[in-house]
Image: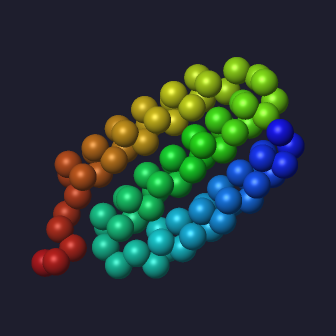
């Protein structure tokens, strides 16, 4: 189980680095919003890997809270954003 957790952590770290690059280099607002959503999903996956590795279910409410904040943030940004192509 330790090897699986290490492999998952390495892959999630690589995904977080690539997603951070997309957030910083994104030419439009929507690219950045998608990058932030992806980073939230990576964080939730990291917490899920930690919960599976440690056997501690106390982080499950944090995963649910991150999902809710990510959804509400994305909905708010896409609802009230200003177009970039003006």
Which residue is at the front of the view, 63 or 85? 63
Picture quadrant of residue 21: bottom right
Asked if residue 78 lies left or right of residue 56, the reply is: left
Instruction: Farthest residue to the right: give it.
Output: 2
Q: Nearer the viewer, residue 62 or 51?
A: 51
Residue beneath the point at 40% across and 65% down? 32
Name the spot of residue 40 as percent of width and height, x first.
Answer: 51, 48
Q: Position of residue 64 (x, y in %)?
A: 51, 28
Q: Which quarter of the rendered picture does the N terminus lie within? A: top right
The residue located at (67%, 27%) in the rendering is: 59
Q: Is residue 78 left or right of residue 19?
A: left
62 in relation to 40, above or below:
above
Q: Where 13 sits versus 47, above or below?
A: below
Residue located 84% across and 49% down the image: 3
User: Is 52 placed left or right of 76 in the picture?
Assistant: right
The foreground one among 47 and 8 is 8
Q: How is the image coloured?
A: rainbow
Count of marks overlaid on the render: 0
13 up-or-down from 18: above or below: above
In which quadrant is the C terminus drawn?
Answer: bottom left
Residue 52 falls in image quadrant: top right
């Amino acid at each position: 189980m330790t090897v699986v957790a290490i492999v998952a952590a390495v892959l999630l770290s690589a995904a977080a680095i690539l997603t951070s690059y997309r957030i910083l280099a994104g030419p439009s607002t929507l690219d950045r919003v998608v990058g932030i959503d992806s980073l939230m999903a990576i964080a939730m996956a990291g917490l899920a890997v930690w919960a599976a590795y440690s056997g501690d279910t106390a982080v499950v409410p944090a995963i649910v809270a991150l999902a809710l904040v990510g959804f509400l943030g994305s909905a708010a940004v896409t609802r009230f954003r200003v177009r970039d192509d003006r």
